[in-house]
Image: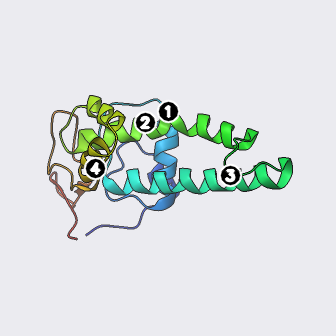
């Protein structure tokens, strides 16, 4: 049986299981420069959602305070973009590790359209069951025994 997580469980490096929105953001920011290990889909997509929402808020603030248009980069947009670049790249690489691919595959994003589609499909793919060469299964949780299992669903 999977139990509810508390804030103390989020700070635990042994935390496994699907991420909630807040735990995904906390894990990604705590692992700002960590390119090793694995990230489940929930961690990747929730963090991307958070970064996008902060980016939209930065654009709105730039427009309200500095009168910039959506085509112009204001200071808040630049700061948020710079702040989220490294952790977004790190969680992307950890997500690729979860499907047992090298982090260098992110360079496919430099190929317009075809590269984007391939990487998008990989990012939506279920991760490798059990441990792989990049680490233990991030969705495995303790079931009360010494065995880690994935929760149903």
| Rendered image quadrant of residue 46 | bottom left
**Label 4, label 2: how many angstroms apart (C-alpha)?**
17 Å
Q: CA distance from mark 3 to mark 1?
A: 23 Å
Residue linked to disc 4: 117
Contact between marks 1 and 2 (CB within 8 A): the answer is: yes
The Cα–Cα distance between marks 1 and 2, rounded to whole angstroms, is 5 Å
Q: Which mark is residue 36?
A: none
Residue 111 position by quadrant: top left
Where residue 88 appears, as percent x and y from the top left, is 46, 40
In the depicted view, which residue is nearer to us: 34 or 61? 61
Can the viewer see residue 6 in this picture? no
Task: Tell whether 152 sits left or right of 116.
Answer: left
Q: Residues within 10 Å of mark 3 (few under 14, many from 20)?
A: few
Which quadrant, please, contains the N terminus? Answer: bottom left
Residue at 69% x, 51% y: name it: 59
| Residue 130, horizontal then vertical, whole percent | 14, 48
Mark 2 surroundings: few (<14), some (14-19) or many (≥20) residues within 10 A? some
At horizontal 16% and vertical 48% (from top left) the residue drawn is: 128
Q: CA distance from mark 3 to mark 4?
A: 26 Å
User: SS for tag 4?
Assistant: helix
Q: Percent position (x, y) of residue 107?
A: 32, 31
Q: Is residue 8 left or right of residue 141?
A: right
Which residue lies under the disc numbered 1? 86
Q: Earlier in the sequence, mark 2 or mark 3?
A: 3
C-alpha gap between disc 1 and disc 4 = 22 Å
**Residue denoted by label 3:** 70
| Count of numbered badges drawn on the protein | 4
> To which residue does mark 2 refer?
89
């Amino acid at each position: 049986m999977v139990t509810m997580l508390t804030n103390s469980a989020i700070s635990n490096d042994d935390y496994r299981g699907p991420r909630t929105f807040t735990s995904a953001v906390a894990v990604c920011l705590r692992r700002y420069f960590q390119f090793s290990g694995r990230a489940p889909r929930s961690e990747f997509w929730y963090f991307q959602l958070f970064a996008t929402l902060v980016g939209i808020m930065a654009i709105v603030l730039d427009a309200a305070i500095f009168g910039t248009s959506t085509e112009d980069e204001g200071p808040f947009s630049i700061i948020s973009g710079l702040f989220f670049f490294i952790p977004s790249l790190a969680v992307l690489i950890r997500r690729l590790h979860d499907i047992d691919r090298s982090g260098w595959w992110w360079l496919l994003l430099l190929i317009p359209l075809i590269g984007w589609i391939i990487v998008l499909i990989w990012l939506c793919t279920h991760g490798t069951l059990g441990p792989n060469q990049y680490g233990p299964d991030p969705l495995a949780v303790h079931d009360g025994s010494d065995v880690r299992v994935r929760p149903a669903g």
